[in-house]
Image (cartoon, rainbow, N blue to C red):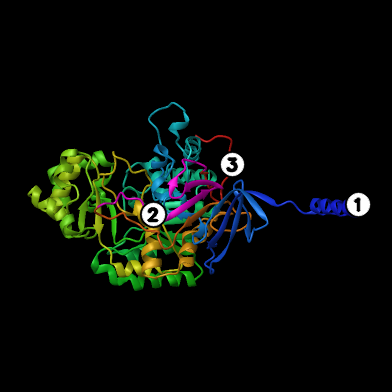
Amino acid sequence: MRYFIFFAAGLFVTLACMQKPRQQYDIIIRNGTIYDGSGSAPFVGDIAIQADTIAAIGKLSDATGKKEINATGLAVAPGFINMLSWADQNLLKDGRSMSDIKQGVTLEVFGEGWSPGPMKRKSKVAVDSLWTTLGGYFNWLMKKGTSTNVASFVGQTSVRNYVMGYDNRKPTDAELAQMKQLVQQAMEEGAMGLGTSLIYAPATYASTDELIELAKVASKYSGMYTTHMRSEGDFILDAVDETIRIAKEASIHAEIYHMKINIARNWPKIDTLLNKIDSAQKAGLKVTANMYPYTASATGLTSRLPTWVQEGGAKEMRKKLKTPTIRKKVLYEMEMGIPYKNSEPQYVALMGFRLDSLNKLYKGKRLSEVAKLHGKNADETVIDLIVRDRSRIEALYYQQSEENVKRIVKLPYVSFGSDGGSETIDDKNVEEGAHPRSYGTFARVLAKYVRDEKLITLQEAVRRLTSLPAANLKIKKRGSIKTGYFADLAIFDPAKVQDYATFEKPKQYSTGMVHVFVNGVQVLQNGEHTGAKPGRTIRGPGYKEKKKVL
């Protein structure tokens, strides 16, 4: 009997020792409703993170995590990709990227015309903070630290300005060769492709042939061509024809920045616009777009001026505007709508000025009202204010229809970008003018167009916030929830996600995002920023690693 007891006890110990130890991970997210980025129906499961990687997905009841998060009732999605971000300077000041992290954005993509490099410096001191190339910017930002990942196109405006300044002319053969070399250098430093903003000087001075030559360089490195087209209003159909031509002749994937149609008389052109894109796609061209879900845009009052008067840069432009004969010509062209008639003054709201005296008088008012207070017509008022404030004067332009916004939201090839910065709201900046898109773009998609209006499903919205832009950018192992992919995750409550930023009071954070992970590190916990800065540079397909780039 005693022998049997000892035998049984020994067998128990032996069996216990034979049992496989439970797998332990750094983090396990339990019982979340997983939207994997593919557009497929969601499923409930667990996600294990080890270091910076998604290590396992499924029912992980036999595993443990050093840290475990209960995501019951929450959506677990890949981190969102902001396809048009102006946070490159914000992140140097405060790398937390607060307004975007609170919406689940884990990748900021720069480069609409202007990019962080190439650029010239007056100082000849070769220190890191005085970077001159796109690669140098990446290196400096990584030293400072950022909560989000970052990527960038090389801006055609930056390239042209580097070589030709604000000259309104055709480049010489040598100048074109130098611009092509700068695009090549940026592509090898990790640019995603070539980005343009053709409605603005000096980018608008470039011919289509010049753009094709630069796009061919980006194409050689499997990059994209992404563009703020020459017109989003009266000549939008000509502009999309140019975009399609560049895609064809440069053999490059083309994407339209913040696709929209401005000014009521042009709204009916949406059918023709979309038909042109559909025809290009059916012909085998890759043409996609991104958007922000608002009926107003934002840009400077200088966009109301003829582009020829902007040649030479802002200082030279103001000098010209003070010259009576030039001012008279500018006013004539503005009145006649040359090259196009901009929005009516009652649809333009001034966001703010450099001078406090002008802020006190005119900030937040419509241009029509400001003109009355100023005692001149709207065109003369615009010129006077630009000269006096010595800035481009940021303004809101209420030019789009909600019906067209909804149609674009529904397009399966459209991703999303804020066309804004990502910053921390504080006492110093809370009263500054801004577009609400900087604080609410992604939450607005999920709240207004998915949950409230049911325009698209949540799984489709997640696909277009994640795997679609990741595939367009040719980014590997991001944009989807798959084993072996980087652990960039956005965990939110679909019933509570909400944007609060308005045109009247834009600086308000969105809510409903509960947890955010970037490269396996938690940067948002229960809606509050952890202070972590695990962001990395995401390089384009042409990247060639070098020891040091300045």
- Mark 2 Cα within 10 Å, few/some/many (few <14, many 20+)? some
Which range is magenta?
A: 505-534
Q: Which residue is mark 2?
A: 511
Look at label 2 and name its amino acid: Thr
Residue 178, numbered circle: none
Q: Secondary structure at mark 2?
A: loop
Q: N-terminal of the two: label 1 or label 2? A: 1
Q: Which one is in front in this view, the residue at disc 1 or the one at disc 2? A: 1
Q: Secondary structure at mark 3?
A: loop
Q: Is residue 139 depicted above or below 461 in this figure?
A: above
Q: N-terminal of the two: label 3 or label 2? A: 2
Residue 545, numbered circle: 3
Q: Which one is in front in this view, the residue at disc 3 or the one at disc 1? A: 1
- Mark 3 Cα within 10 Å, few/some/many (few <14, many 20+)? few
Residue 122 percent coordinates (x, y): 38, 30
- Within the magenta stretch, is there residue 439? no
